[in-house]
Image: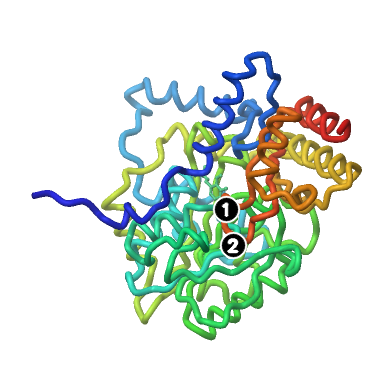
Amino acid sequence: MATINRNYLKLPGSYLFSTIAKKVAAYSSEHPDADIIRLGIGDVTKPLCPAVIKALHTAVDEMGEAGSFKGYAPDLGYEFLRNVIAQKDYRERGCDISPDEIFVSDGAKSDCSNIQEIFGLDNRIAVCDPVYPVYVDSNVMAGRTGEYDEALGKFENVIYMPCTSENGFVPDIPKEIPDLIYLCYPNNPTGTVIKKDELQGWVDFARKNGSIILYDAAYEAFISEEGVPHSIYECQGARECAIEFKSFSKTAGFTGLRLGYTVIPKELSAGGEKLWPLWARRHGTKYNGAPYIIQRAGEAIYSDEGRAQVREQISGYLENAGIISEGLKAAGYEVYGGVNAPYIWMKTKDGMSSWEFFDYLLENLQIVGTPGSGFGPSGEGYFRLTAFGTRENSLRAIERIKGV
Ligand code: PLP
């Protein structure tokens, strides 16, 4: 008789965004004329930039000619893309990363959920709280955690590192030593960043204890301030203790195209074994490469023209973030993030819980956001708004909030 992977049963019922979608659908059916402003899910709204569209057209035409047709992509990704990533994202920032340490993929979600496969099931993971749920859930599915404790909102055998206004949303070094440490900066959901010296502290800690840092830099392109690291490899010694994930989704609006990459330095090892060959093996066995057309589209964001166009898109989102943050502050809210990230993390009003505040905004102002508690127990009392909506909707949302 076939059996299932019972670890899946440990996952609590409904996924955060499906609960939100159900609540919004119920409200809409009761109030069909309601003009709802959606600042909840972190998906982009701006169309792909002209340089990307041009590259896509050219690549599509190549696929229609016998002389330029492409089948399976090379395991690690096409060299034209890995070379430009190594140059522009790393070497030009003073980070020593070579093209063959870059694994091109269909996005950061797959990579940061799959990476745990190359580590032993006895590894203890540490995550920030609140957290992008993928890191925890993928480890639950693999069997690296205990049961979910409904009352605490936590899985057993996971080290949760609270990130609140008290510690500036950068976790304190935990008392227990984790084997795998997930860090994400600029952060989803808090929209906050880590300073280079703080990140260096984590690198030093990991090296001292033989831990591996899994660094998700999916929002790196939104960094607008000096002193904020764009890559963990800006820190000394990070090649010996860190894997980095990057995505084209938020950088260039590729959420529907799908492209990302993972960096594994050649010397990086765990328990005396090198990690690069394991990930290469995993990639080769379970993945057949991001499409040629999409990799050409990715290459296009590194041209002078593409860079300028992508920068303009990001500036537009950051302007929305500014409109929302400043508006909320003017309305008396305590607000974080939104400067180096497309997320605004706010304290709820009058001591409301995150879900009470969700209902309050939906029912009174017809604004949809994301309850902070959905990202972990330390998110309770906080609420996330995204800057990925239109400028007009960002302004309209703030008008409504200020009008209360
Ligand atoms: N990492 C973080 C922190 C994210 O917020 C997201 C998407 O929202 C991803 C990764 C997923 O990126 P991708 O679209 O490349 O899979």
**In the rendered image, which residue does mark 1 sit on?**
375
Name the amino acid type tagged 2: Asp
Q: In the image, residue 104 lies at what x, y percent? A: 45, 49
Q: Which callout, 1 or 2, points at the residue further toward the start of the chain?
A: 2
- Picture coordinates of residue 346, whole percent (x, y): 75, 49
Residue 172: name its quadrant: bottom right
Disc 1 vs disc 2: Cβ atoms closer than 8 Å? Answer: yes
From the image, tell me which residue sits under label 2: 129
Residue at the extreme bottom = 208
Residue 282 located left or right of residue 136: left
Disc ID at residue 79:
none
Sort mark 1 into few (<14), some (14-19) or many (20+) by Cα contacts within 10 Å. many
Does residue 194 sit above or below 78 in this rendering? below
Looking at the image, the residue that sits furthest to the right is 330
The residue most toward the left is 1
Residue 88 visible in the shown view: no
Residue 230 in the image: state x and y as whole percent: 67, 58
Q: Nearer the viewer, residue 213 or 62?
A: 213
Front residue of 295/304: it is 295
Q: In screen coordinates, is 18 left or right of 325?
A: left
Left or right: 232 as drawn, with respect to 357: left
Location of the C terminus by quadrant is top right
Question: Quick one: label 2, few (<14), some, or many (20+) residues within 10 Å?
Answer: many
Residue located at (70% from left, 41% from top): 385
Name the residue type under label 1: Phe
Q: Nearer the viewer, residue 388 or 60?
A: 388
Label 2 sits on a secondary structure element that is: strand
